[in-house]
Image (spheres, grey):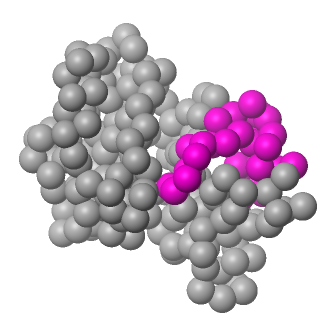
Amino acid sequence: MIYFHALLDVNEANAFIAACPETKQALLIDAGEFNAAFPKFLEENGLKLAAIFITHDHYDHTAGLKDALKYAGNVPVYAYKASIEGVKTTQVKPGDDVKVGSLSGKVFHTPGHAPDGLSLVFPGHCFTGDALFSGSVGGTAGSENYNMQIEAIRKHIFTLPPETKLHVGHGPSSTVAVESRYNPFFV
């Protein structure tokens, strides 16, 4: 898998590109902004932006969606909700596969921080949005949402192989081994 990380100006959110090395098809994961770093990386690596995946509908993960679509054209936008930023999406649900070239990622529902929270898992990589951070979790509105989020992380993320890299919505990446053992919200 070809991988790219961008730290965005909007709320210091992260955005990522995951791409298939064989077909050169690329997936943008979250679009808080679509700055010059994205086209530069895509063009330097001979990649074509083929789809966009939104982990949850908060502006720091979606505000650049229209700019990304202006660049990529009419590519599918995968999300839990039917519309993001006024853009019609291809709705995905837990257990669905998101394919880009020969890469196939599994969708997991990780609500709590946001009702539409999704995580996307490729072999060796998990994109968690704001459900899980390195050493923390995304903020929730109340104990019911908090408990839902903790349960979803334990069920869908901490059951992945320990060496799985966790690419989070804010802050540095981590691994399942580190977060399941040392994240204070789970110890």
Q: Residue furthest bottom?
A: 142
The part of the image, by quadrant, that contains residue 173 is: top right
Q: Tell me where residue 61 appears, x and y as whole percent.
A: 37, 60
Compare residues 165 and 103 and report the one nearer the observer: 165
Residue 128 lies, with reference to residue 74, above or below; the image says: below
The part of the image, by quadrant, that contains residue 39 is: top left
Give left or right: position of 92 versus 186: left
Compare residues 84 and 128 and report the one nearer the observer: 128
Give left or right: position of 143 versus 74: right
* Quadrant position of the C terminus in the picture: bottom right
Give, as a single range, the part of the protein colored magenta.
Answer: 153-181
- Can residue 157 be seen in the rendering of this structure? yes
- Can residue 159 be seen in the rendering of this structure? no
Q: Tell me where residue 148 appears, x and y as whole percent.
A: 70, 73
Residue 21 lies, with reference to residue 52, above or below; the image says: above
Compare residues 77 and 129 and report the one nearer the observer: 129
Could you tell me which residue is drawn at 48 percent across and 68 percent down?
116
How many marks overall?
Answer: 0
Please check the rendered image and state whether residue 56 is part of the magenta-colored stretch, yes or no.
no
Please check the rendered image and state whether residue 172 is part of the magenta-colored stretch, yes or no.
yes
Q: Tell me where residue 123 appears, x and y as whole percent.
A: 61, 28
Could you tell me which residue is drawn at 32 percent across and 15 percent down?
23
Give left or right: position of 147 versus 99: right
Could you tell me which residue is drawn at 70 percent across and 49 percent down?
157
The part of the image, by quadrant, that contains residue 136 is: bottom right
